[in-house]
Amino acid sequence: MGSENYEASAYRIMTTIASNMQAVRTAIAVAASKVGRDPDDVCLLAVSKNFPPDALRAAYNEGQVCFAESYVQEALDKIAALQELVVEWHFIGPIQSNKTRAIAENFSWVHSVDRLKVAERLSGQRPLTLPPLQVCLQVNISKEASKSGVAAIEAEELARAISKLPNLRLRGLMAVPEPSDDVAEQHDSFAQLRRLYEQMNRHGLNLDTLSMGMSHDFAAAIAEGATMVRIGTAIFGERLKNKEQL
Ligand SMILES: *Cc1c(COP(=O)(O)O)cnc(C)c1O
């Protein structure tokens, strides 16, 4: 595309995002109806990390309201650039202690809480002028020591502690399983998270959110009960790394 001018290339990207949005919505509806679920019970989060504000604007113009970001500084820049839009911002990346204030002040949801210390800071730093911060506990269902997320066996105790914090509202569980092309394996991982969620609800935790499923595995996640899917590549295209990742 060396000879394409900037306006033409921007136009091509906008129309691609618009048609990707339609395709993803259709695929979500198909996956839901296959298992007898109402597609409206599956919330689509557009994962916009590494994409510029204009890409989010293109999705917004297609009716997308919920956007998810993984890197705090990059997210703050976009939140500022898109101030005139009515967007619900979700944070889904690793949380460093020194970034909790920015997250507490600028996001509606956080999906990646996996330790009490971080939850306590988020609660303490949540401005009282805002509604409680909506929180999902990130659970490590891949058994890999290096991965983020609380171990499944410790998740309920952590959930109980978090549910007592005044300025957070614990909504559910989130997981990022090992990527797998094996559909049966995808189902296994998501079913593990769903069983944990059901068990916690039997024990009185009152959760209503299962945040699971990405571009390559959201159909399996929906079949296993996902109420939120986090989709980046299938909407915006392949990502290049940003400077916070290098
Ligand atoms: C990047 C990311 C996604 C989106 O992944 P895609 O494969 O691009 O759909 C979802 N969840 C988390 C936690 C992510 O970091």
Image: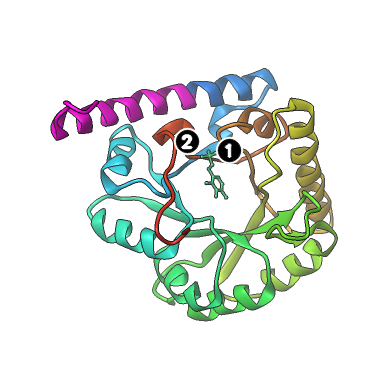
From the Cβ of disc 2, is ligand 1 less than 8 Å away? yes
Dot placed on the residue nearer the N-terminal end, 2 or 1: 1
Is residue 118 or residue 134 the one in the foreground?
118
* Residue 182 drawn at (x, y percent): 74, 27
Reading the image, the residue beneath label 2 is 233
Q: Which residues are magenta?
A: 1-25
Cβ atoms under marks 2 and 1 closer than 8 Å: yes
Secondary structure of residue under mark 1: loop
Reading the image, the residue beneath label 1 is 214
Give amino acid for label 2.
Thr
From the Cβ of disc 1, is ligand 1 less than 8 Å away? yes
Is residue 202 or residue 115 the one in the foreground?
115
Q: Residue at x 57, y 69 (%)?
A: 168
Q: Residue at x 38, y 65 (%)?
A: 73
Taking 63 as reference, is 133 left or right?
A: right
In terms of image quarters, where does ligand 1 lie? top right
* Residue 185 drawn at (x, y percent): 78, 32
Residue 27, image quadrant:
top right
Which callout, 2 or 1, points to the residue nearer the camera? 2
Give amino acid for label 1.
Met
* Residue 231 highlighted magenta (yes or no): no
Residue 188, image quadrant:
top right
How far apart are labels 2 and 1 at the CA level?
A: 9 Å
User: Among all residues in the image, which is located at the extreme front?
Assistant: 2
Q: Residue at x 67, y 18 (%)?
A: 34
